[in-house]
Image (cartoon, rainbow, N blue to C red):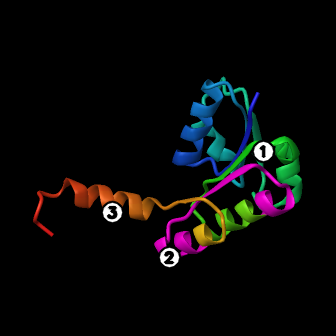
């Protein structure tokens, strides 16, 4: 069974956690706010860890030594970048991804070998694609 660790149990993190879990993944979710876990269904079979994603103990408690994937999906670019770097460089997790809101930072981390998703860029492109052609 594939193992994923998700740091951040907001709207995005909780949705990804549910989808992976339903797909047969072993999922652990870390969030600094224990109330954030209310976004997960009551029958969510994964681990819920109240802690900070850059804390080595929280990552170990989530099972990072056996993780196949670490997804840093908090609202904080710095936190996500740090989690991704720790997962990649210290724990040698095979696949790491960071959610980065600032497009310039996203490009920088991508150049450093950390896959990123920048919703600012994605949403901007979707909006521009929806405009009538030739309007901008």
In the rendered view of the protein, which quadrant contains the C terminus?
A: bottom left
Residue range in magenta is: 86-108
| Quadrant for the N terminus in the image | top right
**Foreground mark, 1 or 2?**
2
Instruction: Determine the secondary structure under disc 2.
Output: helix
Q: Which residue is mark 3?
A: 124
Side (left or right) of 20 relative to 95: left
The CA span between labels 1 and 3 is: 33 Å
Q: Is residue 94 left or right of residue 112?
A: right
Q: Could you tell me which secondary element the residue under label 1 belongs to?
A: strand
Residue 74's spot in the image, x, y percent? Answer: 61, 57
Cβ atoms at labels 2 and 3 below 8 Å apart: no
The residue at the point 77 percent across, 59 percent down is 88
Label 3's element? helix
In the rendered view, tell whether residue 123 sits above or below residue 111. Answer: above
User: Depth check: 116 or 30 in front?
Assistant: 116
Which quadrant of the structure image shows residue 17? top right
Q: Earlier in the sequence, mark 1 or mark 3?
A: 1
- Badge 3 crowding class, 10 Å Cα cut-off, few under 14, some 14 to 19, many 20 or more, is few
Q: Which residue is mark 2?
A: 104
Q: Residue 124: within the magenta?
A: no
Q: Which residue is mark 1?
A: 49
CA separation, marks 1 and 2? 31 Å
**Residue 99 or 36: which is nearer the viewer?**
99
């Amino acid at each position: 069974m594939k193992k994923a660790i998700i740091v951040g149990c907001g709207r995005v993190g909780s949705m990804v956690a549910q989808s992976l879990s339903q797909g047969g993944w072993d999922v652990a979710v870390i969030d600094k706010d224990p109330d954030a876990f209310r976004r997960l269904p009551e029958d969510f079979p994964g681990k819920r860890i109240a802690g900070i994603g850059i804390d080595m103990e929280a990552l170990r408690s989530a099972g990072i030594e056996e993780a196949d994937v670490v997804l840093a999906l908090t609202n904080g670019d710095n936190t996500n970048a740090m989690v991704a770097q720790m997962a990649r460089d210290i724990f040698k997790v095979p696949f790491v991804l960071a959610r980065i809101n600032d497009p310039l930072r996203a490009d920088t981390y991508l150049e450093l070998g950390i896959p990123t998703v920048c919703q600012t860029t994605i949403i901007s492109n979707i909006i521009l694609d929806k405009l009538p052609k030739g309007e901008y």
